[in-house]
Image (cartoon, grey):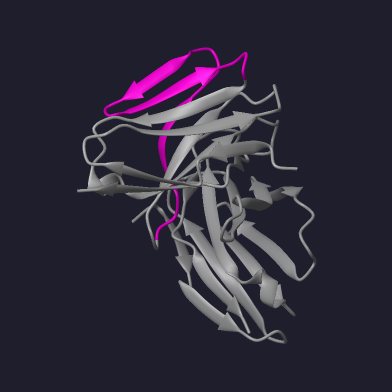
């Protein structure tokens, strides 16, 4: 059972536009929601993360919006640039005692920002 | 460099071979992970080690055998694999019970 559902699967945005990727989850015990960015030939790298006690977090051009009641969260990339072209993964996790912080990932969104 | 180094970067093996993937982290973390990344599928958690003890095993077939000799090194031993095991295998580390996960660049495995 997939615990985190991500959409769209792929996205094409013009340079300067806003890229929006959405995720939904079922498990209300999740308490940590990161977004990872992955370039070809590289492993995923943490982009930005949020905990459910806030509804929005902004870091530069990247913003997470979080809706706890709807069990949804989204990534907004403002002023999208060609260098943002990558695959983006949302994830969700809950901390388990003595077991690290294993993440449940969405299927990923392939973003292409055209010049 | 990501702080998490995986070797080899690419591996081609036959179904009867035995090989091992290696992961080393230089971040002082106490938890290490193996993930499998296949096209069109979410990253799949395979194993979690915390303080060198396996704390999670996500119903992974026995042809995958992990080993964590110390908090800096993690291995994935492979034997009698199937073609559907072809994928990118990612290692990650994190502070114990904490975040974020730091990933290596993966080993691209092809089973022929």
Tell me if residue A69 is in the magenta stretch. Answer: yes
Q: Residue B110 placed where, x, y %?
A: 57, 77
Tell me if residue B54 is in the magenta stretch. Answer: no
Q: Quadrant of residue A2?
A: top right
- Please give the name of the residue rendered at 66% of the width and 49% of the height, measured from the top-left corner: B49
Location of residue B93 with respect to B10 vertically, above or below: above
Location of residue B79 with respect to B68 vertically, above or below: below
- Please give the name of the residue rendered at 58% of the width and 67% of the height, measured from the top-left corner: B87
- Please report the bounds of the magenta region as a residue range: A42-70
- Please give the name of the residue rendered at 59% of the width and 16% of the height, measured from the top-left corner: A68
- Please give the name of the residue rendered at 48% of the width and 70% of the height, measured from the top-left corner: B7
Q: Compare residues A26 and B64 and report the one nearer the observer.
A: A26
Location of residue A26 with respect to B36 vertically, above or below: above
In the rendered image, which quarter contains the C terminus of chain B? bottom right
Q: Quadrant of residue A95?
A: top right
Q: Residue B28 placed where, x, y %?
A: 47, 45
Q: Residue A13 placed where, x, y %?
A: 31, 42
């Amino acid at each position: 059972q997939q615990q985190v559902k991500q959409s769209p699967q792929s996205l094409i945005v013009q340079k300067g536009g806003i890229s929006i990727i959405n995720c939904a989850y079922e498990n209300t015990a999740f308490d940590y929601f990161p977004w990872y960015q992955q370039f070809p030939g590289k492993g995923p790298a943490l982009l930005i993360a949020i905990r459910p006690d806030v509804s929005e977090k902004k870091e530069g051009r990247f913003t997470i919006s979080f809706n706890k009641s709807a069990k949804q969260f989204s990534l907004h990339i403002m002023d999208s640039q060609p260098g943002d072209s990558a695959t983006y993964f949302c994830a969700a996790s809950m901390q388990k005692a003595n077991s690290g912080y294993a993440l449940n990932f969405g299927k990923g969104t392939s973003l292409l920002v055209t010049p | 460099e990501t702080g998490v180094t995986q070797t080899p970067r690419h591996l081609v093996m036959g179904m009867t071979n035995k090989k091992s993937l290696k992961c080393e982290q230089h971040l002082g973390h106490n938890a290490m992970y193996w993930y499998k990344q296949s096209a069109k599928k979410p990253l799949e958690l395979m194993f979690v080690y915390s303080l060198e003890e396996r704390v999670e095993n996500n119903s992974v077939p026995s042809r995958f055998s992990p080993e964590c000799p110390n908090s800096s090194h993690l291995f994935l031993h492979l034997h009698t694999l199937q073609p559907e095991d072809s994928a990118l295998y990612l290692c990650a580390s994190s502070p114990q019970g904490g975040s974020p996960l730091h990933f290596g660049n993966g080993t691209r495995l092809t089973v022929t």
